Amino acid sequence: MAGRLKGKVAVVTAAGAGIGQAIAQAFVAEGATVWATDINREALDAIPRARRAKLDVLSDKQVARFAEKVGGIDILANVAGFVHHGTILECDDKAWDFSFDLNVKSMHRMSKAFLPGMLARAAEAKSSEVGTGSREDFAPRKTCSIINLASGASSVRGAPNRYVYGATKAAVIGLTKAIAVDFIARGIRCNAICPGTIQSPSLDQRIAALAASSGKSEAEVRAMFIARQPIGRLGTAEEVAKLAVYLASDESAFTTGSTHMVDGGWAL
């Protein structure tokens, strides 16, 4: 199918690389008007068909101004995040606060800023639908969708050396369910995607850092990451983006408050 998001307006954070970029590109390909955002404005040039904007999701003021500028949207993909490596013993207050600010509070900021406009659009769509008491009343409805990037390393499963990262992603799942239940009757759906190990620039950086600290080669470290994947390979950002398209579209109109694994069986 094509044009699955035609007529919808979407905002994607951390669209400069990796999963965020793949989601923004997929949304554009499916016909959405996409606002691709990132703290690195130049990185957004890889999505030429999107509207591109520099945005620091750690800034209340920037997020509020951006939401006012964009207005009502149908889809919000909260992708920005940071992977801290270490146990509780390597996590000081600075690392804890930064991880929660970027991984969790940024989603709070974005969702709170855009929800009023999303509620208005959902109400408008609902008012245009006329119930007849027939089978059509059970057809999928047009809804607005918030998609939050969580992780398999969360409340789903513990992962070595992912202490504060796992805590933040567990919080993302809780945040997702809270938004879903509060607005389920008002046309807003909220779901979480939980990727496993995905090939991305972020993973390349983590592999390089772990190689440097462990004395192993980058090839050896990468092989370790692959070896722990039951499916036998790393995932791709495009595979995550395909799920995001489904959750953004009205095809998933009966799906909310759920965690969706894209992890190659890692959580089995």
Image: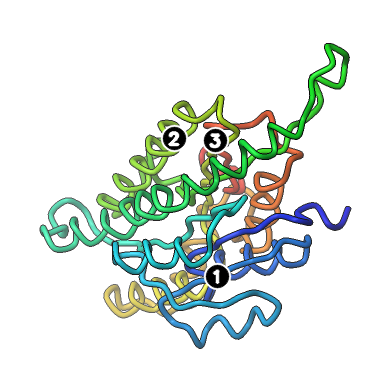
Location of the C terminus (image quadrant)? top right
Q: Secondary structure at mark 1?
A: helix
Q: Which mark is residue 234?
A: none
* Relative side of 213 to 64, left or right: left
Q: Tell me which residue sits at (48%, 61%) in the image.
A: 225
Mark 3 is surrounded, within 10 Å at the Cα level, by few (under 14), some (14 to 19) or many (20 or more) other residues, namely few
Q: Position of residue 216 (x, y in %)?
A: 36, 76
First in residue order: circle 1 vs circle 2: 1
Based on the displayed image, in which of its 4 quarters is residue 213 positioned?
Answer: bottom left
Q: Tell me which residue sits at (76%, 56%) in the image.
A: 7
Give, as a three-letter code, the residue at label 3: Leu
Q: Secondary structure at mark 3?
A: loop
- Asked if residue 50 is positioned above or below residue 6 in the image, the reply reads below
Q: Tell me which residue sits at (47%, 75%) in the image.
A: 204
- Asked if residue 7 is positioned above or below residue 166 in the image, the reply reads below
Q: Which residue is identified by label 2?
A: 179
Q: Position of residue 69 (x, y in %)?
A: 48, 67
Closest to the observer: 237 or 174?
174
Q: Tell me which residue sits at (56%, 42%) in the image.
A: 120
First in residue order: circle 3 vs circle 1: 1
Q: In front of the other: label 3 or label 2?
A: 2
Q: In front of the other: label 3 or label 1?
A: 1
Mark 2 is surrounded, within 10 Å at the Cα level, by few (under 14), some (14 to 19) or many (20 or more) other residues, namely many
Give, as a three-letter code, the residue at label 1: Gly
Q: How is the image coloured?
A: rainbow
* Relative side of 89 to 211, left or right: left
Q: Which mark is residue 18?
A: 1
Q: Which residue is identified by label 3?
A: 268
Closest to the observer: 123 or 5?
123
* Relative side of 244 to 30, left or right: left
Q: Position of residue 172 (x, y in %)?
A: 39, 43
First in residue order: circle 3 vs circle 2: 2
